[in-house]
């Protein structure tokens, strides 16, 4: 990685402004539903503390509408972090302002400060320079460990780097970049990418970017039906993006002229309604009856994917194979999670993009059986699309 990391920082006595991604799911009674993102940033926070530095942590949580709203407060997260670190985490009720500045000035080695939700100020997402400058004024150095937000040029991820040096990556950021960069630039072969999810429109760029790089591309999920329509198949009431059918045709042509293998489902689980308890049948994809909809890949497709995954040395997976939120249509997605866990055991490098596929892996309890489960859905997708992430680009080069 040609970006400087926290290992390149002199930490002793330094106030280290660290952008973390503590945008964690919360329950209705304001408890943390999944602490993965917090836990994954602990090595960076501990490194700052163990090196004699003072972490000043900043994050967003949820989508507040540019003003304070208690349900999006980071206070419970700061308290939870305190229990993980076995220390009291101080909390600033606003991320900017004179009170916060006084709290920062009074910090001593051994302290940890967490700032209130950055998105209580619209200036954060607008990347307002004055706002960024205030944040930057708190630290002697900047660490970005918020991979999940690295695809956004916000004040705390990009703007701040114009007013504060040095700017380096934390350990979580480093791990994410290293795994994804290997998959994009230097994969061990055979290299299999498995893409699913609802719509082609969200995945076009990643399909086109990965197609020349992979040995095998597997396409599942709702977006497969737009490809089937492009092939002239009956798709019943399945999810189809009519305006993307010609694009799907074009991609199928591109696939033909490339020497890549692309696997589309050969059978699917269909339902007479979009409901978990709908009537279900398993049919070959060319025998889809009118009035039914495909909600998951079928067992023959899973077998086909298994053959590819078994031989692969690198596997990247983004997007569920079916409507996995409904238990009767979750099997295909869960089987893929299982296949990846087995492949990892057999020595393959397996990478799961964040979002729904990461949730499926967690639901199966397979997280620790995968080489890398990304904490950033949108960010990992953009990385795989070959885009430069502004939050990474803004860090100091080695
Ligand atoms: P994405 O955000 O594009 O990765 O899409 C994830 C969503 O795709 C999930 O909410 C799934 O329920 C949905 N999905 C996957 N397969 C299908 C399908 N066959 N029909 C409708 N929705 C699907």
Image: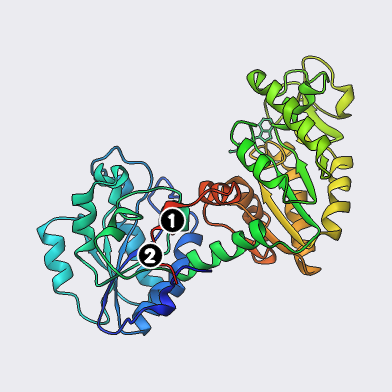
Classify 208 as above or below 77: above
188, 290: nearer the viewer: 188
Q: Which residue is drawn at 32% across and 77% down?
A: 87
Where does the image place residue 31, in percent across and percent down from the top left? 41, 54
Rendering quadrant holding ligand 1: top right
What residue is disc 2 on?
Answer: 80
Please say whether residue 264 is visible from this viewpoint: no
Q: Which residue is drawn at 53% across and 69% down?
A: 1
Q: Which residue is drawn at 43% across and 79% down?
A: 7
Where does the image place residue 156, in percent across and percent down from the top left? 31, 55
Classify 84 as above or below 214: below
Q: In which image quadrant can residue 287 be found? A: top right
Q: Is residue 271 left or right of residue 282?
A: left
What residue is disc 1 on?
Answer: 32
Between the residue at mark 1 and the residue at mark 2, the CA separation in whole angstroms equals: 8 Å
Q: In this view, does 161 lie to the left or right of 374?
A: left
Please say whether residue 50 is visible from this viewpoint: yes
Q: What element carries label 2?
A: helix
Residue contact between numbered discs 1 and 2, judged by CB atoms under 8 Å: yes
Where does the image place residue 272, in percent across and percent down from the top left? 76, 21
Q: What element carries label 1?
A: loop
77, 137: nearer the viewer: 137
Mark 2: few, some, or many residues within 10 Å (few <14, many ≥20)? some
Q: Please identify the quadrant where the C terminus is shown.
A: bottom left
Where does the image place residue 8, in percent across and percent down from the top left? 41, 79
Q: In which image quadrant can residue 50 be found? A: bottom left
Q: Which residue is drawn at 66% across and 18% down?
A: 242
């Amino acid at each position: 990685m040609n970006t400087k990391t926290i290992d390149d920082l002199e930490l002793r006595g330094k106030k280290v402004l660290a952008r973390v991604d503590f945008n964690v799911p919360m329950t209705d009674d304001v408890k943390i539903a999944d602490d993965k993102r917090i836990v994954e940033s602990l090595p960076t926070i501990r490194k700052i503390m163990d090196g004699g530095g003072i972490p000043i942590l900043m994050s967003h949580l949820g989508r507040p509408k540019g003003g304070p709203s208690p349900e999006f407060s980071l206070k419970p997260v700061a308290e939870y972090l305190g229990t993980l670190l076995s220390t009291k985490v101080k909390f600033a009720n606003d991320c900017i302002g004179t009170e916060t500045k006084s709290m920062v000035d009074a910090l001593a080695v051994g302290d940890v400060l967490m700032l209130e939700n950055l998105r209580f100020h619209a200036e954060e997402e607008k990347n307002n320079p004055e706002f960024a400058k205030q944040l930057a004024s708190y630290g002697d150095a900047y660490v970005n460990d918020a991979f999940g937000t690295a695809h956004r040029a916000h004040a705390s991820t990009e703007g701040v780097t114009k007013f504060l040096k040095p700017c380096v990556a934390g350990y979580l950021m480093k791990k994410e970049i290293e795994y994804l960069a290997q998959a994009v630039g230097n994969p061990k072969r055979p290299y299999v990418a498995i893409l699913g999810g609802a719509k082609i429109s969200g995945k076009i760029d990643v399909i086109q970017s990965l197609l020349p790089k992979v040995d095998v591309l597997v396409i599942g999920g709702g977006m497969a039906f737009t490809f089937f329509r492009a092939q002239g198949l009956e798709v019943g009431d399945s999810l189809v993006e009519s305006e993307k059918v010609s694009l799907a045709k074009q991609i199928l042509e591109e696939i033909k002229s490339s020497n890549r293998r692309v696997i589309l489902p050969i059978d699917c689980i269909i339902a007479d309604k979009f409901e978990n308890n709908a009537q279900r049948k398993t049919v070959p994809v060319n025998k889809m009856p009118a009035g039914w909809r495909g909600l998951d890949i079928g067992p023959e497709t899973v077998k086909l994917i298994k053959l590819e995954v078994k031989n692969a040395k690198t596997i990247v997976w983004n997007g569920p194979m079916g409507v996995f939120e409904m238990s009767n249509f979750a099997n295909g997605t869960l089987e893929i999670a299982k296949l990846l866990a087995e492949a990892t055991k057999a020595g393959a490098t397996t990478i799961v993009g964040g979002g729904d596929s990461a949730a499926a892996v967690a639901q199966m309890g397979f997280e620790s059986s995968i080489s890398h489960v990304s904490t950033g859905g949108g960010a990992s997708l953009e990385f795989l699309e070959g885009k430069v992430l502004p939050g990474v680009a803004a860090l100091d080069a080695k």
